[in-house]
Image (cartoon, rainbow, N blue to C red):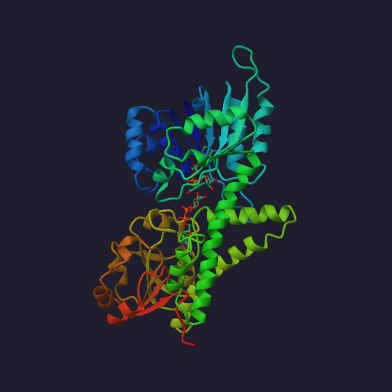
């Protein structure tokens, strides 16, 4: 099929590359000319495992090309995917500006029948609104004077960064929302080459598909906030959360995923999707008490860590040197959108601390995001520990999991490790003369 994907970010580029790999002719469109030039040259604009090789192979095969102009791309399209960003506005609602601009552009330039598929995460009702925009000008006829037929579908994406290609090639579910049975048939054919269990191709109406995406991210966020709350409570009561997690995991009804306590969920999706759903609930007069609690608990995890650091230095961080390991919101990506590390660094610097940070792939993106904040970066993890009064581990990259504690001890001026991802055992650190703080650690009662 002839596919156009608008928005060549994490979702759009992965979609484009994987659909080209499945044998389709794909044009990826992005309004960012620099990005398009980089992609044409075979360079990934962000770090994502496996995507670089896939991009080169598909580009070289001629099945995948890049464009800045929507008009040039859509001429022969059977399916147009919308995969532009939908970040949060100040009030928590989803910012649909880019998406609606794309719809307006499409309405002007589509000249033949096609399906427009919304892959971006959008509030319930957005698909219907886009359909109206598209149909306003679909009164036009094609070259043979036939009325153009533009159908709309919702096909939310469930990939996670750091394993995006793998997730797209082997989806655990494919959700398609549409009103027209032909949309189901065409999209089923498109996804046929992918490795999913047939039972997991789920058809529904557009509104339900839009909501399903928010439901999934809310459920994931709920588990994280729940384990974080239990972890704090367990520590306060003198219980050990890692033992408790083993018990939870052993129950097949609970399972073990998204039960890793830490500094709270970050990233470009969970936080903004929760906010957008809470905003929608408010508009509909629904209380959304659970969703609000999930969000509150998430924010308080970061405060707990900052409070512990302040407490350790008795409220005076001025001229303290703090080493930070890990900047991306999770391992496997250089994405620092809503990364807990950045909030923490800003707070530490505001308190007068001198922060030196290291991340294996996210230093450039973090440097750009922290433009107003003075932070030093090191070439290696151990470099930033030199003369540090404390080390804060913010992302569980593999290289931080078994560091040489002898070297850390020698490099540091202080001896405190704030381990926000529970990577280390206090007994191990004690052997090296290092002190350990973990969120939810057992308190003496
Ligand atoms: P992104 O910011 O990485 O990419 C969006 C791209 O769209 C950018 O390259 C931008 O230049 C381009 N763009 C913006 N306006 C445009 C326009 N008018 N015309 C052409 N291009 C335009 O975003 P993302 O992380 O890929 O997320 C896209 C959507 O998918 C969001 O709704 C997000 O919630 C959802 N989603 C993201 C992920 C993820 O892991 N990142 C996973 C599932 C769903
Ligand atoms: C998440 C979902 O996992 C994807 O299914 C979804 O498609 C995507 O959002 C989206 O809608 O964009 P992602 O943001 O890439 O994917 O990251 P996750 O792996 O889900 O992690 C999110 C955050 O939760 C990270 O900050 C991570 O550190 C944290 N987390 C995760 C925990 O604190 N504990 C856990 O047990 C798991």
Residue sitting farthest toward the top: 144
Q: Is residue 311 above or below residue 248?
A: below
Residue 372 visible in the picture: no
Residue sitting farthest toward the right: 285
Quadrant housing residue 389? bottom left
Q: Is residue 1 above or below residue 332?
A: above
Q: Which residue appears at 56% of the width and 52% of the height?
A: 216
Residue 97 placed where, x, y %? Answer: 61, 43
Q: Which residue appears at 72% of the width and 53% of the height?
A: 283
Decide which of 41, 291 is in the foreground and name it. 291
Q: Is residue 282 above or below residue 192?
A: below
Q: Is residue 103 above or below residue 371?
A: above
Does residue 339 appear left or right of residue 149 in this picture? left
Residue 208 placed where, x, y %? Answer: 64, 43
Q: Which residue appears at 59% of the width and 63% of the height?
A: 294
Quadrant housing residue 300? bottom right
Decide which of 141, 209 is in the foreground and name it. 209
Q: Which residue appears at 41% of the width and 36% of the height?
A: 18
Decide which of 174, 94 is in the foreground and name it. 174
Residue sitting farthest toward the bottom: 445
């Amino acid at each position: 099929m002839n596919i156009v994907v608008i928005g060549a970010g994490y979702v759009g580029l992965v979609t484009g590359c994987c659909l080209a790999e499945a044998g389709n002719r794909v044009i990826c469109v992005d309004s960012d000319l620099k990005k398009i030039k980089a992609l044409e040259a075979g360079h990934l604009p962000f770090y994502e495992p496996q995507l670089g090789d896939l991009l080169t192979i598909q580009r070289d095969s001629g099945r995948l090309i890049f464009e800045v102009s929507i008009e040039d791309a859509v001429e022969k399209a059977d399916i147009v995917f919308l995969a532009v960003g939908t970040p949060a506005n100040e009030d928590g609602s989803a910012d649909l500006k880019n998406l609606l601009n794309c719809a307006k552009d499409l309405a002007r330039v589509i000249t033949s029948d096609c399906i427009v598929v919304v892959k971006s995460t959008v509030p319930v009702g957005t698909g219907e609104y886009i359909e109206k925009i598209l149909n306003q000008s679909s009164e036009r006829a094609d070259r043979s004077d036939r009325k153009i037929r533009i159908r709309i579908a919702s096909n939310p994406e469930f990939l996670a960064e750091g394993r995006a290609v793998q997730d797209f090639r082997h989806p655990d579910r494919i959700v398609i929302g549409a009103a027209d049975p032909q949309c189901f048939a065409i999209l089923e054919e498109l996804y046929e080459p992918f490795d999913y269990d047939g039972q997991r191709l789920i058809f529904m109406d557009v509104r339900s598909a839009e909501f399903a995406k928010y439901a999934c991210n809310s459920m994931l966020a709920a588990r994280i906030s729940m384990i974080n709350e239990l972890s704090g409570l367990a520590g306060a009561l003198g219980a050990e959360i890692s033992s408790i997690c083993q018990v939870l995991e052993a129950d097949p009804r609970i399972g073990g995923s998204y039960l890793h306590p830490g500094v709270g969920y970050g990233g470009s999706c969970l936080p903004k999707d929760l906010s957008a759903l809470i905003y929608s609930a408010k508009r509909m007069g629904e209380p959304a008490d659970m969703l609000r609690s999930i969000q509150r608990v998430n924010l308080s995890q970061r405060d707990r860590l900052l409070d512990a650091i302040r407490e350790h230095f008795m409220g005076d961080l001025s001229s303290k040197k703090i080493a930070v390991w890990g900047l991306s919101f999770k391992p496997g990506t250089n994405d620092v959108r809503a990364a807990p590390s950045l909030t923490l660094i800003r707070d530490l610097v505001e308190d007068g601390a001198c922060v030196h940070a290291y991340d294996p792939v996210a230093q450039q993106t973090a440097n750009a995001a922290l433009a107003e904040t003075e932070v030093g970066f090191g070439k290696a993890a151990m470099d930033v520990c030199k003369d540090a009064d404390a080390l804060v581990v913010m992302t569980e990259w593999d290289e931080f999991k078994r560091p040489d504690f002898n070297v850390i001890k020698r490099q540091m001026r202080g001896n405190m490790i704030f381990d926000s991802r529970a990577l280390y055992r206090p007994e191990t650190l004690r052997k090296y003369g290092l002190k350990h703080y973990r969120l939810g650690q057992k308190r003496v009662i």
